[in-house]
Amino acid sequence: MFKITMECDSCGQCKECCPVDGAIIEDKPYKISAEHCAECGACVDECPKQAIVEE
């Protein structure tokens, strides 16, 4: 499972690349829905702030 740290600036790049609707929850910082996340890791590679880490 992945989580988004406080380094997130809510740029939206993770949400754009995520193949699953509803996996990224828009908040400050963004959050990842454990229920919807496919754990593919696409968001990890896309995040310019490296704010998405494995729990």
Image (cartoon, helix red, strand yellow):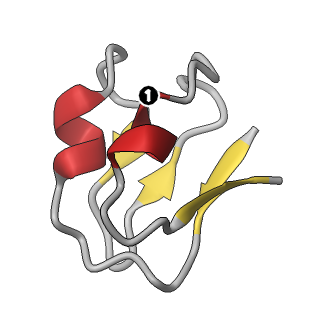
Q: Which residue is drawn at 27% across and 79% down?
A: 9
* Left or right side of 12 for 19: right
What residue would you read off at disc 1? 42
The quadrant holding residue 30 is bottom left
Q: How crowded is mark 1: few (under 14 residues within 10 Å), some or many (20 or more)?
A: some
Instruction: Report the residue that reaches farthest toward the right.
Output: 55
Percent coordinates x, y for residue 43 in the rendering? 42, 39
- Image quarter in which the N terminus is found: top right
Residue 30, above or below 41: below
Give whichever of 35, 39 is nearer the camera. Answer: 39
* Left or right side of 13 for 30: right
Residue 23, above or below 30: above
Q: Could you tell me which secondary element the residue under label 1 belongs to?
A: helix
Q: Which residue is drawn at 32% across and 26% down?
A: 18
* Left or right side of 37 for 1: right
Give whichever of 3, 33 is nearer the camera. Answer: 3
Residue 53, above or below 13: below
Percent coordinates x, y for residue 34 in the rendering? 66, 36
The quadrant holding residue 14 is top left
Percent coordinates x, y for residue 8 in the rendering? 38, 76
Residue 20, above or below 54: above
Q: Residue at x 57, y 18 (%)?
A: 40
Number of marks drawn: 1
The kind of residue on which mark 1 rests is Ala
Q: Residue at x 63, y 27 (%)?
A: 35
Instruction: Report the residue that reaches farthest toward the bottom.
Output: 6
* Left or right side of 44 for 18: left
Percent coordinates x, y for residue 41 in the rendering? 56, 29
